[in-house]
Image (spheres, helix red, strand yellow):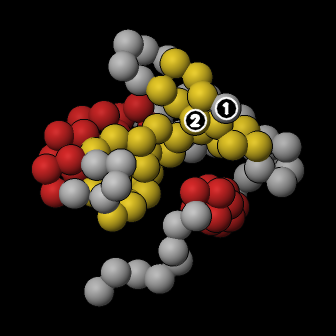
Amino acid sequence: MEIGVAAGDVAHVLTLPDRRSLAWREFGDPAGVACIFTTGTPASGFMGAMYDGPARHAGVRWISVDKPGYGLSDFQPGRTLLDYPADVAALGDHLGLDREPIE
C-alpha cells in the first residue's frame, strides 16, 4: 500500500506477520545499491528525505523506515530493542534485498 503524507512524499506500508504495519519511504537512486536507514528517536522515516540528493548522487537507494510507534508504523506493545531487527528483515525480504553485506 502507498500513502501520500506530504507533497512529493509517498510512504509504503507492509503488513508484518503479527498484523502490524511497518512503513517506509524511498529516496535517492531507485536503481542504486540498497541502504536501509533507521532514524534516531523521536524521528520517523520521513527524516530520510534529507539524504535524497546525496544518495541519488552516490547511486544509493535510500530506504528510510518508520520505527514501531513512529510515523505510519504501528506501535508494538511490550517490544524490546531486539524485536526491531525482525521487522527490518521482513522489509528486506519484502523488497527482495540481498542479505549479504557489500564489501
Q: Which of the marked residues, 1 or 2, is nearer the chain's N terminus?
A: 1
Instruction: Return the residue nearer the eye: 74 or 96.
Output: 96
Q: Residue furthest front?
A: 31
Above or below 62: residue 100: below
Residue 1 disc label: 1
Q: Write down the quadrant of residue 70 in the picture.
A: top right
Q: Which residue is mark 2?
A: 12
Find numbered disc 2 in the image and state the secondary structure of the residue it sits on.
strand
**Label 1: few (<14), some (14–19) or many (≥20) C-alpha neighbours in 10 Å:** few
- Tell me if I can see residue 73 in this picture: no
The three-letter amino acid code for the residue at tag 2 is His
Residue 13 image point, x, y percent: 64, 36
Please name the residue shown 25% across and 40% down the image: 52
Give the spatial CA distance, label 1 vs label 2: 6 Å
Q: Quadrant of residue 74?
A: top right
Q: Quadrant of the N terminus?
A: top right
Residue at 52% over, 67% down:
97
Q: Are marks 1 and 2 in contact (CB under 8 Å)?
A: yes
